[in-house]
Image (spheres, grey):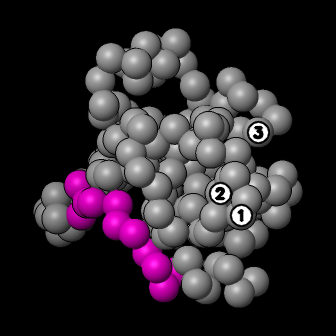
């Protein structure tokens, strides 16, 4: 869950795109601790999208989850890691106004131990990826 900073909040008001850093394991295997997301602030959200939202009970904290379905005036959001928790199973549907944007790209920084030519080549090929809507995961998560 990336923490909300004043710089992020200021940039969100000025630009339609901005960064958010992922901390914690709730979105593994899609996102890992240390990944940096390019977030499209105010983008239209649909089922299966990876979204950035304010935590319903601690609104100075940003949370990254997958929007699964609309429930009333909000979104049911789940982490891709079923064992991490901290999603709608704990706090219910998230009101629409707390959903801030949609993740478009994921950048995975190089780890210090990646020194061999093979490891560096593998990192180069996978460091920057689009964050796609995963409708199959959305259906799978909804069935839990």
- The answer to whether residue 86 is left or right of residue 117 is right
Residue assigned mark 1: 71
96 in relation to 31, above or below = above
Image marks 2 and 1: residues in contact by CB distance under 8 Å: yes
Mark 3 or mark 2, which is nearer to you? 2
Depth check: give the residue in front, 8 or 25: 8
Q: Residue furthest right?
A: 90
Residue assigned mark 2: 75
- The answer to whether residue 122 is left or right of residue 36 is left
Q: Secondary structure under badge 1?
A: strand
Residue assigned mark 3: 56
Q: Tell me the CA gap for discs 1 and 3.
A: 15 Å
Q: Quadrant of the N terminus?
A: top right
Q: Which residues are magenta?
A: 126-137
Depth check: give the residue in front, 38 or 56: 56
Sequence-first disc among 3 and 2:
3
Image marks 3 and 2: residues in contact by CB distance under 8 Å: no
Q: Quadrant of the C terminus?
A: bottom right
């Amino acid at each position: 869950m990336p923490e909300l900073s004043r710089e992020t909040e200021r940039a969100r008001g000025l630009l339609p795109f901005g960064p958010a850093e992922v901390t914690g394991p709730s979105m593994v295997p899609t996102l890992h601790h240390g990944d940096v997301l390019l977030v499209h602030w105010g983008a239209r959200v649909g089922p299966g999208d990876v979204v950035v939202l304010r935590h319903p009970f601690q609104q100075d904290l940003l949370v990254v989850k997958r929007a699964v379905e609309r429930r009333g005036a909000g979104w049911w959001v789940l982490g891709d890691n079923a064992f991490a928790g901290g999603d709608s199973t704990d706090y219910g549907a998230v009101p629409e106004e707390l959903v801030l944007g949609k993740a478009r790209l994921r950048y995975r920084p190089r780890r210090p131990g990646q020194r061999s030519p093979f490891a560096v080549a593998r990192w180069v090929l996978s460091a920057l990826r689009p964050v796609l809507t995963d409708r199959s995961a959305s259906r799978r998560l909804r069935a839990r």
